[in-house]
Image (cartoon, helix red, strand yellow):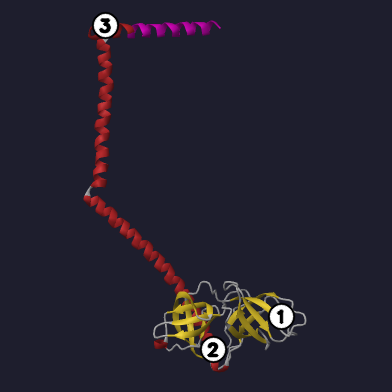
Amino acid sequence: MRDTRRARMILGLLLLAALVTLTIDHRSGEGSPLGALRAGGAWLFGSAEQVGTTVTNPVGGFFQAMVNAPSAQSDIQRLKAENAKLRSELAAGRLDAGRSGQLKRLLGLSGLGGYKIVTANVVARRGVPGFEEAAEIDAGTADGIRPEMTVLNGDGLVGRVVQAESGTATVVLISDPASSAGARLENGNEIGVVHGVAENGRLVQFKLLDSTAPLERGGRIVSFGSQRGTPYVPGVPVGVIERVEATPGELTRIAYARPYADLTALDVVGVVVDAPKRDPRDALLPPKDGAR
């Protein structure tokens, strides 16, 4: 307690002395005996401020001048343009690499199946009279493409050509509700018909004509083929059965399959301009583990 009282007394005396000093200095004006001390403090702190300003102002001015200089602005714009170009080239490189992979798979599948094809790129998704799910490709009659030709990609069946002009053609996808294609179960002769359904291309319906034939989840479907290969050539992978509907008493059996071809993200496709001389049967189906 003694130490605390002593500290409070000393603090009070110091505050009183400071107050008396300030009062004397204020009332004395220019003749104050503390004038020299006040002037020295002002000189000391003013000099420090001036030195700080002298050091920092040139640095800030240098950077400001660098940013505002015409040559600097030109360099900034040039760098921005170069960065945009590099980003564009990088995106194009990725796109080219992706298309190269698709083309490689397409040529591998068509070569194995014996299909003579014309390659094309899907340039737009469009509807045409009578069909909802269709796409436009950048190849046409000038390339040997005609209506009622099979269209596939490196994974499987895509659809058929319904219209063709000199440099473009319209393809109706197997996912279209008005589309139908003959199909066959793997490792057998049981045939049916594939129809599009309202599943945004994720599933197609497979109607097996023999109601007594086995139909199970995981079964795989290939195209059955049409007379003279139009509109569909045989042996093209169609899809994998995901679910089977119960149809007691019906003359047909119904299943829903996931197409091998991603019908929602088509890019590189091939139009079969010449059917194979022999049916490749199941040779084009990928191995069960999904690798090709």
Sequence order check: which comes first, mark 1 or mark 3? Answer: 3
SS of the residue under disc 2: loop
User: Which residue is located at x 30 percent, y 56 percent?
Assistant: 79
- Closer to the observer: label 2 or label 1? 2
Between 79 and 170, the one lying in front of the other is 170
In the image, taking residue 2 as reference, residue 78 lies left or right, namely left
Sequence order check: which comes first, mark 3 or mark 2? Answer: 3
Disc 3/disc 2 C-alpha distance (Å): 113 Å
Q: Which residue is disc 2 drawn over?
A: 231
* Amino acid carrying mark 2 in the image: Pro
Q: Where is residue 117 in the image (x, y as percent from the top left)?
A: 47, 86
Disc 1/disc 3 C-alpha distance (Å): 113 Å
Q: Position of residue 74 (x, y in %)?
A: 25, 54
* Amino acid carrying mark 1 in the image: Leu
Q: How many numbered discs?
A: 3
Could you say which quadrant of the image residue 121 lies in?
bottom left
Instruction: Give above or below for 2 relative to 282.
Output: above
User: Which residue is located at x 28 percent, y 6 percent?
Assistant: 27
SS of the residue under disc 1: loop
Task: Using the image, tell me which numbered label, if any, was put on residue 215.
Answer: 1
Quarter of the figure that contains the C terminus: bottom right
Task: Using the image, tell me which numbered label, if any, was put on residue 269.
Answer: none
Q: Position of residue 210 (x, y in %)?
A: 72, 86
Between 21 and 169, the one lying in front of the other is 169
Disc 2/disc 1 C-alpha distance (Å): 26 Å
Q: Does the magenta stretch include residue 258?
A: no
Report the span colored magenta. Answer: 1-22
Predominant secondary structure, magenta span: helix
Task: Using the image, tell me which numbered label, if any, was put on residue 28.
Answer: 3
Q: Where is residue 130 in the image (x, y as percent from the top left)?
A: 53, 81
Neighbour tally class for label 3: few under 14, some 14-19, many 20 plus, Cα within 10 Å: few
Quarter of the figure that contains the N terminus: top right
